[in-house]
Image (spheres, rainbow, N blue to C red):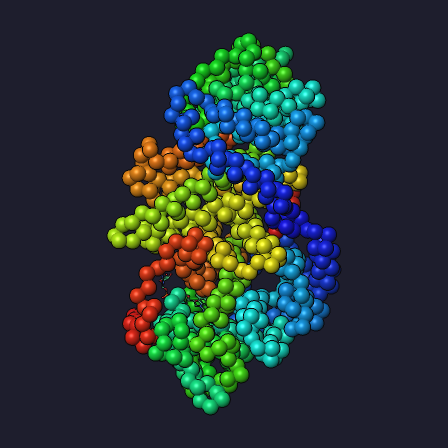
């Protein structure tokens, strides 16, 4: 067992650092970690992100683990970690490719035809076109297989009708991966089919939704008689659930700790700068206990993901264990933000970045982290996954499993 | 980076599990617990010594097996899984380790082979009553080769024949090696929270002892020793926690209520999932700490604190959930839950509570941040 770089990893790290030093500005290690939730949507930020991705791709630093034939570098997952650690030390635009590169790319590689792979993967890696995930619907979130957006075959095309919701980035994306219902008479999971859809196609309408933090990162997407060629089908007709599972499995690995990990340094600084009972808060034992818990959880999550990567780099496939990262990390992020606001006292009510402690980063995080506990599977769904797939406890009782989809009751308060 | 144990190390672990499954069922722990005056299981102790585990990290030249600390922590985890009623942590992780790190060649020659063979049982005497022990203000004195004072409680104190005693020397705290059969040592039995391990009070009146390490730097030596022991004992805790979860899971699958296995109720599923996550978070911290311990990395100072706190919390949570999920039978003497509950608390109290380690963690983190030192494994 060794947490240090192997000689190859060390050489790779040096090479990565040398390139980064030439192409980006080092981050001040004492600066407060930026919170980017708010500014992601601006056209300017998107363009900067695209430029950075192209620069990386052209120099051979993009999608490191993907096969070379599709524009990747054919490297191992641990090298990707090393790259991530180094890139994190530089000021770079926000990553708008989490969904595409983390989840949709691997899905294409697993289920796409050779023609589809050639057509989309390299282009996806270079990042001039951006991809979104069109899974959730107003009546089908956690219960994803309950979705109703329909696809009906018409000649060589499929015609899509329905609505998706909470689609991150759909307003600046060019392609989407969508799960649709192609057979309402089949049982719930059996009647689904997966497609690649052109977000600029006729009949696709994207309406940004305003979030609780004031940003508009996600959208409603309406489909009215949208024609999708059969060549854009990923996997067999009726096999969409299996394809979607690949996306979801990769989602668990891609999302990782989500939220708080790595923030403890800022939190310690805040505890040194704020006072409680007339003394620096860092001297208060209740504060120290909490800080220690956050550190322990953050490091535990980081090393848990390294353990997973260690196993994956030796050829294992991503398993349900990946659910831990988000199940623990997302609520921890919210708790950390809450604790930071507690430390701020009355100033915890101030969201003005010009005067709030640490540039209101924690206020933003407090408003952003509830979304992280829901996106990519809620806390509850992730705990079900750990209980059922890791600990092998009995599955939830399902009353809808063997009935034709048409007959299953649904409901939501509108 | 490679976070997996080697094949050889896994083999050591496998052998340990096999041996303990055969020779240390939970009935062995229960027997010591229920036998008045028993301090440990001598047969198991002898067997474990013959396997070479007591000297796993002791060089062959000093009578050990010459393995390393990665092997030692894996053995500790198995000892923890079995709730083995033997003074492993006290003798191996504390006393043997102290002599290994700080002993003179003569002390090593004299004690290490006997400790590795299990002929001598060692322990560590720091605490002097309630509260977290403060090395800087101990009342026990060491002067001119003589110890005077009271140590309470001393873990495995009734089983041990040799103790590493922390005392106030002429120029600050020191470590002293004390033969417990020496004149001036009065040992009294103290009722143990986990009677599968013994506890004692030591009254020392001019008892002859030897310095272990120099007359200066004792506080740092104690800190180093505790960091090192925390990793090994943490793995014992991890083993106990994991086993408690496994047994509880089995029980929940077999126990029916309202026409269903109770393991199918989401409230219980989520609690078991939470517990699993807590144990895995502790385990990941443990791997980091074990690596730092075995490679002599400076990260040990932080990693030992994190892991020790996480492992104590994980084992205690696991034991608490174990009783709750077993329901009424979980609260009976006959079921094994209380063996875990007792051991978890006993180990948590053994070398500083989880909260004291968390406090130390922050002290060390702040010091490092103050020096502008980064995090060797920043995300
Ligand atoms: C910021 C953000 C970004 C997102 N981005 C995308 C995206 O890009 N693409 C996309 O397709 N979707 C996206 N989503 C949608 C997300 O996947 C869903 O919101 C999520 O799966 C929950 O579904 P829901 O909102 O319908 O809530 P519901 O499923 O209605 O859940 C409501 C509550 O019921 C609980 N619940 C539901 N089922 C169970 C159960 N079996 N056991 C216990 N509790 C249960 C949930 O945990 C939750 O607390 C995003 C969401 C957010 C917040």
Estimate the x, y position of residue A293 in percent, counting from the top left: 49, 45
Q: Position of residue B86 (x, y in %)?
A: 50, 28
Task: Return the residue nearer the eye: B199 or A403.
Answer: A403
Q: Residue at x 45, y 48 (%)?
A: B276
- Outermost residue toward the left in this view: B258
Query: Does residue B345 appear anywhere in the picture?
Result: no
Q: Quadrant of residue A107?
A: bottom right
- Name the quarter showing ligand 1: bottom left
Q: Residue A285: percent from the left, percent from the top?
A: 47, 38
* Farthest residue, direction bottom: A155
Residue at x-position 62% and y-position 56%:
A314
Residue B59 visible within the image: yes
User: What residue sits 42% from the left and 19% below the top?
Assistant: B37
Residue B100 picture location, percent across and down: 65, 27
The residue at the point 48 percent across, 32 percent down is B23
Of residue B186 and residue A361, the one placed in the foreground of this image is: B186
As drawn, is B35 to the left or to the right of B187? Answer: left
Residue A363 versus residue A306: which sits nearer the camera?
Answer: A306
- Depth check: give the residue in front, A281 or A225: A225
Instruction: Name which quarter of the figure residue B91 lies in.
Output: top right
Q: Is residue B318 above or below residue A163?
A: above
The quadrant in which the C terminus of chain B is found is bottom right
Numbered disc total: 0
From the viewer's perspective, tell me whether residue A199 is left or right of residue A349.
Answer: right
């Amino acid at each position: 067992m060794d947490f240090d770089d192997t000689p190859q990893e060390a050489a790779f790290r040096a090479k990565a650092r040398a390139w980064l030093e030439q192409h980006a500005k080092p981050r001040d290690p004492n600066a407060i970690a930026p919170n980017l939730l708010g500014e992601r949507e601006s056209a300017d930020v998107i363009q900067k992100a695209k430029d950075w991705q192209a620069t990386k791709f052209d120099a051979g630093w993009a999608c490191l683990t993907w096969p070379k034939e599709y524009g990747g570098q054919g490297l191992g997952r641990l090298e990707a970690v090393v790259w991530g650690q180094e890139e994190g030390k530089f000021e770079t635009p926000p990553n708008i490719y989490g969904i595409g590169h983390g989840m949709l790319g691997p899905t294409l590689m697993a289920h796409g035809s050779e023609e589809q792979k050639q057509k989309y993967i390299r282009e996806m890696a270079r990042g001039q076109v951006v991809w979104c995930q069109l899974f959730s619907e107003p009546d089908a979130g956690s219960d994803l297989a309950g979705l109703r957006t329909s696809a009906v075959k018409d000649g060589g095309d499929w015609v899509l009708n329905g609505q998706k919701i909470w689609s991150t980035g759909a307003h600046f994306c060019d392609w989407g991966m969508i799960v649709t219902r192609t057979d309402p008479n089949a049982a719930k999971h059996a009647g689904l089919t997966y497609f690649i859809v052109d977000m600029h196609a006729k009949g696709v309408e994207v309406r940004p939704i305003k979030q609780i933090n004031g940003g508009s990162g996600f959208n409603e997407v309406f489909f009215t008689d949208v024609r999708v060629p059969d060549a854009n089908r990923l996997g067999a007709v009726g096999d969409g659930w299996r394809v979607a599972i690949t996306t979801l499995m990769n989602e668990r690995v891609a999302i990782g700790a989500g939220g708080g990990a790595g923030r403890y340094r800022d939190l310690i600084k805040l505890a040194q700068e704020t006072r409680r009972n007339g003394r620096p808060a860092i001297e208060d034992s209740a504060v120290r206990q909490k800080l220690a818990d956050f550190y322990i959880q953050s490091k535990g999550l980081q090393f848990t993901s390294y353990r997973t990567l260690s196993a994956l780099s030796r050829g294992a496939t991503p398993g349900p264990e990946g659910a831990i990262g988000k199940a623990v990390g997302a609520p921890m992020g919210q708790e950390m933000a809450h604790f930071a606001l507690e430390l701020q006292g009355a100033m915890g009510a101030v969201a003005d970045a010009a005067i709030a402690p640490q540039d209101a980063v924690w206020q933003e995080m407090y408003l952003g982290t509830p979304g992280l506990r829901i996106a990519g599977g809620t806390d509850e769904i992730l705990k079900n996954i750990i209980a059922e797939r890791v600990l092998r406890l009995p599955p939830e009782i399902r009353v809808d499993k063997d009935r034709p989809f048409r007959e299953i009751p649904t409901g939501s308060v509108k | 980076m490679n976070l997996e144990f080697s094949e050889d190390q896994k083999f050591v672990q496998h052998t340990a599990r096999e041996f303990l499954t055969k020779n240390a069922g939970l009935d062995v722990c229960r027997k010591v617990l229920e036998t008045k005056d028993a301090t440990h299981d001598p047969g198991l102790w002898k067997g474990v010594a013959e396997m070479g585990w007591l000297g796993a990290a002791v060089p062959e030249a000093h009578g050990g097996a010459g393995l390393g600390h990665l092997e030692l922590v894996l053995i500790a985890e198995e000892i923890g899984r079995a709730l083995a009623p033997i003074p492993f942590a006290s003798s191996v992780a504390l006393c043997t380790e102290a002599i290994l790190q700080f002993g003179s060649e003569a002390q090593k020659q004299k004690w290490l082979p006997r400790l590795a063979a299990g002929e001598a049982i060692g322990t560590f005497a720091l605490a002097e009553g309630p509260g977290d022990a403060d090395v800087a203000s101990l009342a026990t004195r060491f002067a001119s080769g003589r110890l005077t004072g009271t140590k309470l409680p001393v873990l495995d104190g009734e089983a041990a024949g040799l103790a590493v005693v922390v005392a106030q020397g002429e120029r600050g705290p020191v470590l002293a090696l004390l033969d417990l059969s020496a004149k001036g040592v009065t040992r009294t039995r103290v009722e143990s929270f986990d009677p599968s391990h013994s506890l004692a009070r030591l009254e020392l009146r001019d008892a002859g002892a030897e310095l272990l390490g120099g007359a200066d730097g004792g506080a740092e030596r104690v800190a180093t020793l505790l960091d090192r022991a925390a990793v090994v004992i943490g793995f014992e805790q991890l083993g106990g926690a994991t086993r408690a979860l496994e047994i509880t899971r089995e029980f929940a699958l077999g126990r029916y209520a309202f026409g269903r296995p109770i393991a199918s109720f989401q409230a219980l599923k989520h609690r078991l999932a939470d517990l699993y996550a807590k144990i895995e978070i502790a385990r990941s911290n443990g791997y980091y700490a074990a690596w730092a311990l075995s490679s002599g990395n400076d990260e040990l100072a932080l990693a030992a604190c994190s892991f020790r706190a996480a492992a104590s919390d994980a084992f205690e949570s696991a034991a608490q959930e174990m009783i709750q999920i077993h329901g009424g039978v979980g609260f009976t003497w006959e079921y094994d839950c209380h063996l875990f509950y007792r051991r978890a608390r006993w180990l948590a109290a053994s070398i500083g509570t989880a909260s004291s380690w968390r406090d130390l963690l922050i002290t060390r983190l702040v010091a490092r941040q103050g020096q502008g030192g980064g995090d060797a494994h920043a995300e």
